[in-house]
Image: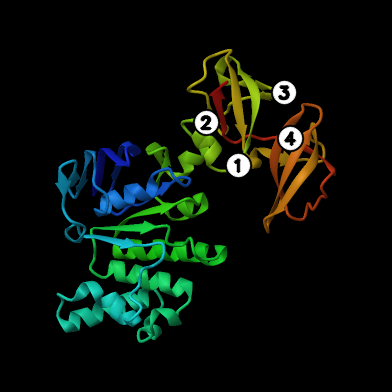
Amino acid sequence: MLQLDQVQVSYAGQRVLDDLSCQVQAGDIVSLLGSSGSGKTTALRAIAGFEPLQAGSIHLRRQRIADATGGLPPEQRAIGMVFQDYALFPHLTVADNVAFGLHRLPKVRRTGRIMQLLAAVDLAHLGSRYPHELSGGQQQRVALARALAPSPALLLLDEPFSNLDIELRERLSLAVRDLLQAEQVTAILVTHDQHEAFAISDQIGLMHQGRILQWDTPYNLYHKPKTRFVADFIGQGEFIPGQVLAKGALATEFGILQPGPHTPIETSCCGSEQWVDILLRPDDVVPDTHGPIQARIVEKAFKGAEILYTLHSRQHNTRLLSLFPSHHNHAVGDTVRLRIEAKHVICFSR
């Protein structure tokens, strides 16, 4: 559906996108994930036609829509866009906002499409209201319906949930995914929230300094990060020192981590007898009243069904993170016992 090939975009002589390349398959929902300044919004604007390219090319459905010599204007690209601030027309009703891109359709078909989409975003009863009469979540859904109305080849969403509270953001992101799949729309979401990206995406491109460091499934980004930066950015965890032994086993201060059929160890970048840093996720460090590791709780974060504890092992002078069931409600300063039960171990050369 979409291909970016070595795209470069600069502002005032400073490179913002640096040889950016990726492919998006038809029907996929993908996310460009990264911190502020990583270039993800610039990439979206370049695809939409709002930013000129200094080098590289962009193809949509095998048609070149942009390169260093120019490109199709935004209105000819068959691309829909949902902005962070929704950008609804304040003087138009909800129904008229949705109808904005449907002026070429006959009236009957136009009315039918409006009602179809308002029903899909659960706003059929609010078609006659104006944007200022709606909540933020409702305005976001109107913006989505308006962008989907002309049946675009590609839908771009620029941090569409960032102005919403966390609970509404999570609920709407799942509803948007269901709607995009029902409409069979290919979509690219820009976000800095990895939980949001994980919930909605088939593929995620993790961006840093204008490049995509890893383009992969959410599962592989979490369990098989290709670089230490990706491992640090995705999820939570702490690194401990270790050494690669024969057959991929790892010697650590907490004992030997032995690979098995259900405990793969990602040591592709690490040779035998090499010293490495091993990433332990919170779910690798398991509470166990008879466990061999003693650690003191230095921080706690209640997460509903679980509590995330930050721990310090005096014996090894090591910091660990661990998820406990929430009924294991310990106080900061308490000592608990643990064991390492790594389901998927990631290591990098020291």
Task: For label 4, count other residues whose C-alpha is less than 10 Å away and answer few (under 14), some (14-19) or many (20+).
Answer: some
Where is residue 277, by image quadrant? top right
* Mark 3 closeness class: few <14, some 14–19, many ≥20 residues within 10 Å: few
Left or right, 289 with respect to 310, comes to right
**Is residue 184 at least partly visible in the picture?**
yes
x and y percentages locating residue 176 in the rendered image: 40, 64
Q: What number is the disc on residue 339?
A: 4
Sequence-earlier tag: 2 or 4? 2
**Residue at screen point 15% across, 42% down:** 69
Among numbered discs 3 and 1, the one appearing first in the sequence: 1
- What's the residue type where badge 1 is placed? Gln
- Label 2 sits on a secondary structure element that is helix
Q: CA distance from mark 3 to mark 1?
A: 20 Å
Disc nearest the viewer among 2 and 4: 2
Q: Which residue is denoted by mark 1 in the rendering? A: 236
Disc nearer the start of the sequence (4/1):
1
Q: Residue lying furthest top in this view?
A: 273
Up/down of 245 relative to 239, above or below: above
**The C terminus lies in which quarter of the figure?**
top right
**Residue 64 appears in the figure:** no
Query: CA–CA distance between discs 2 and 1?
Result: 12 Å
Amino acid at dot 4: Arg
Q: Where is residue 195 shown, x and y percent of the image?
A: 52, 52
- SS type, badge 1: loop
Question: Which type of secondary structure does the marked residue at label 3 adopt?
Answer: loop
Amino acid type shown at disc 2: Arg
Mark nearer the N terminus (3 vs 4): 3
Q: Which residue is labeled 3 in the image? A: 253
* Viewer-side label of 3, 4: 3
Query: Which of the two discs, 2 and 3, labels the residue nearer the N terminus?
Result: 2
C-alpha gap between disc 2 and disc 3: 21 Å
Q: Amino acid at mark 3?
A: Glu
